[in-house]
Image: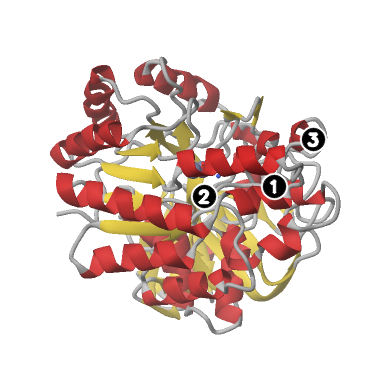
Amino acid sequence: MPTTLITGGTVVNATGRGAADVLIDGEKIVAILDPGSTLLGHDLKASVDRVVDAAGKYVIPGGIDAHTHMEMPFGGTFASDTFETGTTAAAWGGTTSIIDFVVQYAGENPLDQYALWHQKAAGSCAIDYGFHQILSDVQDSSLDAMDELVAEGVSSFKLFQAYKGVFLSDDGQILRAMQKAADNGALIMMHAENGSWIDTVVQQLVAQGKTDPYYHGISRPWQAEEEATHRAIMLAQYTGAPLYVVHVSAKQAVAQIATARDNGQNVFGETCPQYLYLTLEDQLGAPGFEGAKWVCSTPLRSKAEHHQEHMWQALRTNDLQVVSTDHCPFCMKGQKELGIGDFSKIPNGIGSVEHRVDLLYQGVVTGQITLERWVELIAVTPARMFGLYGRKGVLAPGADADVVVYDPNGHTSIGVGKTHHMNMDYSAWEGYEIDGHVDTVISRGSVIVDDGQFLGTAGHGKFLKRDLSQYLV
Ligand code: URP
Ligand code: ZN
Ligand code: ZN
């Protein structure tokens, strides 16, 4: 494979930034050099196969989106991005690794499902991919499967406190899975919403004729998120399991996570771009059926209650550690439309895999997070959290050459027909005008996006066998 030199840029890692050149040989970074360095008296530029000019730009580790659902069977349909379309869109947006969820519904064998997900993803992905395993009914066989999956490099398991009859595990089942995780070192990921509470409110609202998408948000109050988050933390405390709460949207849930962390528990929290920008009033409350575009769970929260500002604050203060997308796209036509006349039948999910790096960069532009914190949130911490750090999430000799050249003076217009490559007939971010631009994306030494062109291939992406979380001793 060719050698590449990225010259003239500002290299940004979690630990700092500085002018440096990045030398890539094959799939790996081999050196971070002073700008303009020579090798044995030779001009490096002249001796490499390819030079990428990064003057005036940031050179950052490729993004890691630790929460995606490609082709997920859910809500009576399938998430509209395949592994091919979804990973291609991710690459366009500066993400070079995803961690997707293998789905196990009640009665299914987790190991069979794991094999099925490998079949779906193998040969299809434009970027590297790993798996978490969803467990929806925790049986003795599921506990055995957890050991086998950890040995396979699937070191994290998602459980649900909501979606009765679909994904929900009761507290006893959660307890048993957590006991296993405390024993084998796996990380428990939690969809923290009180499902029984929500199901009852949904029935009441629909019976009252309150069927518009807006009521999806009303049916899933912050109290139901806070309560479930607290309960998950207590179960984790009792069992000694590490806990990672996914798609946190309520400021009260953040407070629960922060308290647990202050008490010394291994509890972590993730939020998503939709909870930083989009609101119950403006998006879910859009006229007619329009709000269906933004139906996801946990739901968008009230602007009047200032949850969005709190999410930014928590990212700055490290009360939350990761930003993933929870990419679970559905088209309006034939998919979201399933819920016309009944919001509870709208497939839950938003597609953002292409925009996470850009959307988070706006926090740097507005002074809410530093450049280093941006890199930490989109790449470094996801790598550490999910056992990839060293290989991924860092620009250093020996790491995979997953590199993004980001132009802070560039501009990105988001929307269908603009920078949108996701398999969706709308954009949750239509009309967003963003400072900054992903110029060049390198995945394991191969340039897969450059100068407005996709140069990658489906099948380039390799399965990531992950270690245990590097946040746990
Ligand atoms: O609405 C969402 N979040 N859909 C994807 C499934 C999940 O709960 O993460
Ligand atoms: Zn979830
Ligand atoms: Zn999800």
Q: Is residue 345 left or right of residue 3?
A: right
Mark 2 is surrounded, within 10 Å at the Cα level, by few (under 14), some (14 to 19) or many (20 or more) other residues, namely many
Give percent across and percent down for residue 229.
37, 53
Residue 88 in sight here: yes
Give percent across and percent down for residue 185.
19, 42
User: Quarter-wise, where is residue 78 in the image?
Assistant: top right
Q: Is residue 41 left or right of residue 407?
A: left
Q: Which residue is mark 3?
A: 337
Q: Nearer the viewer, residue 167 or 360?
A: 167
Mark 1 is surrounded, within 10 Å at the Cα level, by few (under 14), some (14 to 19) or many (20 or more) other residues, namely some
User: Quarter-wise, where is residue 463 in the image?
Assistant: top left
Element on which disc 3 rests: helix
Asked if the residue at tag 1 contacts the one at tag 3, i.e. Cβ–Cβ closer than 8 Å, the answer is no
Is the residue 343 above or below the residue 63 in the image? above
Q: How far apart in space, not on screen, are marks 3 and 1 (Cα)?
A: 32 Å
Looking at the rendered structure, the kind of residue marked 1 is Phe
Element on which disc 1 rests: strand
Give percent across and percent down for residue 119.
50, 20
Q: Nearer the viewer, residue 210 or 238?
A: 210
Is the residue 197 above or below the residue 335 in the image? below
